[in-house]
Image: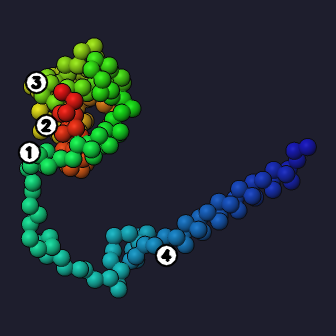
Amino acid sequence: MFDTMTFTKILGGFCGAFLIFLLGNWAGESLYHTGGGEGGHGEAHADAYPIETGDDHGGEPVEEVDFATLLAAADIGKGERVFNKCRSCHSIEDGVNGTGPSLFGVVERDVASAAGFGFSGALDGIEGNWTPEALSAFLQSPKGFAPGTAMSFNGLPKETDRANIIAWLATLN
């Protein structure tokens, strides 16, 4: 049933597949990596040349808008749509907690003070209220704002999204 010839065929099949894999890898390396040297890494190709971009980053400096200005111009409708990212864990009903605490009245509420919700130790040590600026910092990077928090959300990188959702949450107070 299982003789030496069958074993030899199976071993030969694996060796042949491995050889094809190695040859494909070698061909890919030679196609997509430039320069010589050990493995072709780190050296510039002979036909390559640097592109000078200057230090001005495209002309005039980008004007930074403070968060209060963004909050004043926030779109509440867009904030409600952005909240759909939060809806799986948070409720907006007063006193109804989910995986995360209820966000009803969260703007200007004390940090880690939602009734009936057990906060992680990371938020228990933070003093003060959830001001719009503090909420923005938390929503940008929850783990950066409160290292060790149990919140697994990666954050909202766009400042306008954070302003929109905070403006919408402020209407729930």
> Which x, y percent locates residue 65?
9, 54
Q: Earlier in the sequence, mark 1 or mark 2?
A: 1
Q: CA distance from mark 3 to mark 2?
A: 15 Å
Instruction: Identify the mark at residue 109; answer none if there is no mark.
Output: none
> Which x, y percent locates residue 44?
32, 77
- Name the secondary structure under disc 3: loop
Camera-side residue of 76 and 86: 76
Residue 34 visible in the picture: yes
| For the residues bearing labels 1 and 2, Cβ distance under 8 angstroms | yes
Q: Nearer the viewer, mark 4 or mark 1?
A: 1
- Name the secondary structure under disc 1: helix
Q: CA distance from mark 1 to mark 2?
A: 8 Å
- Mark 4 highlights which residue? 31
- Name the secondary structure under disc 4: helix
Q: Which residue shows up at 27% across the image and 44% down it?
A: 77
Tell me the quadrant of the picture where the C terminus can be found: top left
- Mark 3 highlights which residue? 127
- Mark 2 highlights which residue? 132
- Mark 1 highlights which residue? 68
Amino acid type for the residue under numbered disc 4: Leu
Q: CA distance from mark 3 to mark 1?
A: 21 Å
Q: CA distance from mark 3 to mark 4?
A: 57 Å
Q: Nearer the viewer, mark 2 or mark 4?
A: 2
